[in-house]
Amino acid sequence: MEGGGVAEKQASYTYWVRETREDAAPLPVPRKLSADDISKQPQPNTLGSVWNQAGTWEERNLNSWASNRIKELLKSIDSLEFSNGKAYIDDVSKCSGDAFLVTVRNKKRVGYTYELTLKFKGEWLIQNENKKIKGHLDIPEFSFGELEDLQVEVSLSEEKDLAAKDRMQICKDLRTFLIPIREKLMDFEQELKDR
């Protein structure tokens, strides 16, 4: 630094390169894509509607399909034979709830919440006499992934001339409908996932 001169310091890194050097890559040149170039590009696999190509958020109401499908599956349950009688599902009198399919970040998620009332008809041998018995099975609120906790409540329509012991036996017999009902609802869950 003698003589008042300033030593020039060569920078090893520059943020903006202002000069083109021989070893630098050439600058990109824009070119128009042909129809052939566009058709060769892979199309992203998106779920949901055409307007939602990014798959951000989309919710579809599946109530109508789900209610009809649950009724159809539950009506297909075979009659059950018990030690003193038999019974079958006559009708699905109440099937209320919501079912939906949500697309979030290009991933499909499904869910539902339902309540059911199933009418049954049956015949039991009580005190050496065949008695026709009607009633309904109530399944309180159940939702997606909670079928292992499913419960059924039995209500008999004509119980005035039944002894308490007979009534309890019939209710116990009817609770065995829980296994085929659970199986049908698991089938429903799988169909909902596959939509």
Image (spheres, rainbow, N blue to C red):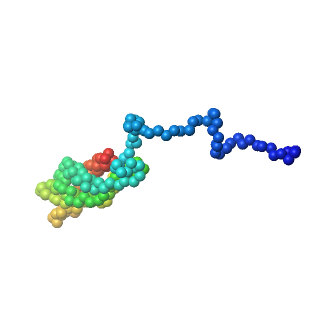
Residue 95: x and y in percent read: 25, 58
Q: Closest to the observer: 36 or 29?
A: 29
What is the number of callouts on the image? 0
Q: In this view, does 2 lie to the left or right of 89?
A: right
At x 21%, y 51%, the residue is 72
In the rendered image of this protein, does residue 140 appear above or below residue 15? below
Residue 67: x and y in percent read: 25, 55
Q: In this view, does 15 lie to the left or right of 57?
A: right
Residue 46: x and y in percent read: 38, 45
At x 19%, y 53%, the residue is 89
On the rendered image, what quadrant is the N terminus found in?
A: top right
Residue 168: x and y in percent read: 24, 59
Q: Is residue 73 visible?
A: yes
Q: Closest to the observer: 39 or 42?
A: 39
In the rendered image of this protein, does residue 29 appear above or below residue 117? above
Q: In which quarter of the image is residue 22?
A: top right
Q: Closest to the observer: 72 or 108?
A: 108
At x 49%, y 40%, the residue is 30
At x 40%, y 42%, the residue is 44
What is the residue that sits farthest to the right in this orientation? 2
What is the residue that sits farthest to the top in this orientation? 23
